[in-house]
Image (cartoon, rainbow, N blue to C red):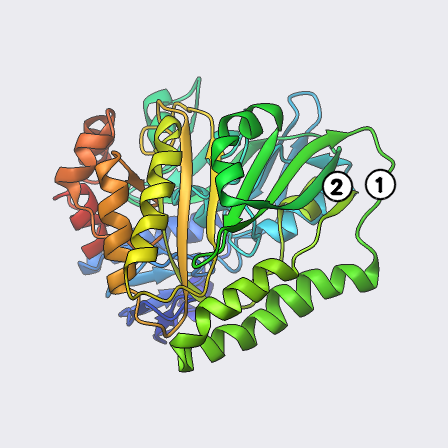
Amino acid sequence: MTSTYARTTTSAWRNWAGTVTARPARAESPASVDELAEVVRRANADGLRVKAVGTGHSFTAAAATDGVLIRPDLLTGIRDIDRTAMTVTVEAGTPLKRLNAALAREGLSLTNMGDIMEQTVAGATSTGTHGTGRESASIAAQIRALELVTADGSVLRCSAEENPEVFAAARIGLGALGVITAITFAVEPVFLLTAREEPMGFDRVTAEFDELVTENEHFEFYWFPHTGNCNTKRNNRSGGPAAPPGRVSGWIDDELLSNGVFQVACSLGRAIPATIPSIARLSSRALSARTYTDIPYKVFTSPRRVRFVEMEYAVPRERAVAALWELKAMVERSPLKISFPVEVRTAPADDIALSTASGRESAYIAVHLYRGTPHRSYFTAVERIMTAHSGRPHWGKIHTRDADYLAGVYPRFGEFTALRDRLDPDRLFGNDYLRRVLGD
């Protein structure tokens, strides 16, 4: 028995939100690319499908399997930093929080990132995790090369120069093309961002939306349903000096209010839904303006300890305001009680086949509900609005779209599925979720 199989288990796997449970025939924790390739070959020989998981922050069953579940816990760390090319190559199972901290120690940074950093680098990129940005957003768009183990157990390296047709698709590959083992990201010298957080009315933020996006490197806002109140955040590069939030004030804003008090409010709202509109009005009015300056990952990201379920759609940026007004009108005329703010971000067009921003400037509209709250009625109504605007669902968040719909909103959908047919004709890396969204 090799050391790989000494790390074989059969325990169940559950995602962060508790919405997906998988009971694989076995789970493997390979410690090297060679071991991972052997795991894939052995699974193929045993007639078992293979899926790799990250930290489970997807709300869909993208990583679920009844075959072999690959845990990336031992595939972590930085392989190489190239200061001439300004790239970092990192093992696929490395959590973003560890990558960010390691880069900061080296005086380096990613250009942009999402608002949490618990995910592994492979999990985050494979599902299209993004932040908000005028020129940059998706983490996958910062990939310069990647390495993956394909269905026959071989190791394939791809970049714009090497296997470019695979590179064009595999940066957001949904785990359908192989198991990613390493990713090379573009980096830059660490810089400072000044964050300006400010309450603003829904009428004003939607009227000035294009201006706010154009004038700021990174703009986002949160609308509190049952109110006309929003909280906006503008992040722009700064010459310094660094002026991070104070220890006490930062704890009050980011832990006590955003997590502790919000947890209590969500629990109360779930138990007594009629209280939610009043809580929303109090919560939105409690927010005050603040400005601080820090290194990027400390500005882009924040702790999220209140568990929730989420749906997010990317719509053409020019349709965002219309979709938001329709969403607001739907909430106001319905009996729904929505305890979580609606999050709005933007992204420039990119060239990744299954990116939600593929070929078009996009606005992201994300809706959430506290975990354990019935979500189907709300999410169904939101999805109806978003699909009317040619919306593309986030691959890792709850949605009901299938391959027929997705082929109509992704111009390069056929390019991706043809590549899948070539790399994984027997669907070794398939599961029920991929059958729905990619077809079979």
When the figure is inspected, residue 385 is found, relative to residue 398, above or below; the finding is: above
The reply to whether residue 302 is visible in this rendering is: yes
**Rendered position, 113 above or below 285:** above
Q: Secondary structure at mark 2?
A: loop
- Residue 416: x and y, percent? 25, 31
**Residue type pointed to by label 1:** Ala
Q: Residue at x 70, y 41 (%)?
A: 196
Instruction: Look at mark 2 in the image and give the residue it sits on.
Output: 295
The reply to whether residue 154 is visible in this rendering is no
Position in image of residue 429 (x %, y %)? 25, 49
Residue 239's place in the image compared with 345, above or below, is above
**Residue at the limit of the structure toward the right, as seen here:** 241
The image position of residue 412, as x and y in percent, is 25, 25
Q: Amino acid at mark 2?
A: Ile
Q: Nearer the viewer, residue 95 or 228?
A: 228
Q: Is residue 83 left or right of residue 218?
A: right
Q: Which residue is mark 1?
A: 242
Name which quarter of the figure residue 372 lies in.
Answer: bottom left
Q: Is residue 127 above or below residue 47?
A: above
In the image, 413: left or right of 81?
A: left
Q: Residue at x 45, y 42 (%)?
A: 125
Judged from the image, the secondary structure of the residue bearing numbered disc 1 is loop
Q: How far is the residue under mark 1 from the one under mark 2?
A: 8 Å
Q: Residues within 10 Å of mark 1 (few under 14, many from 20)?
A: some
Left or right, residue 225 beside residue 288: left
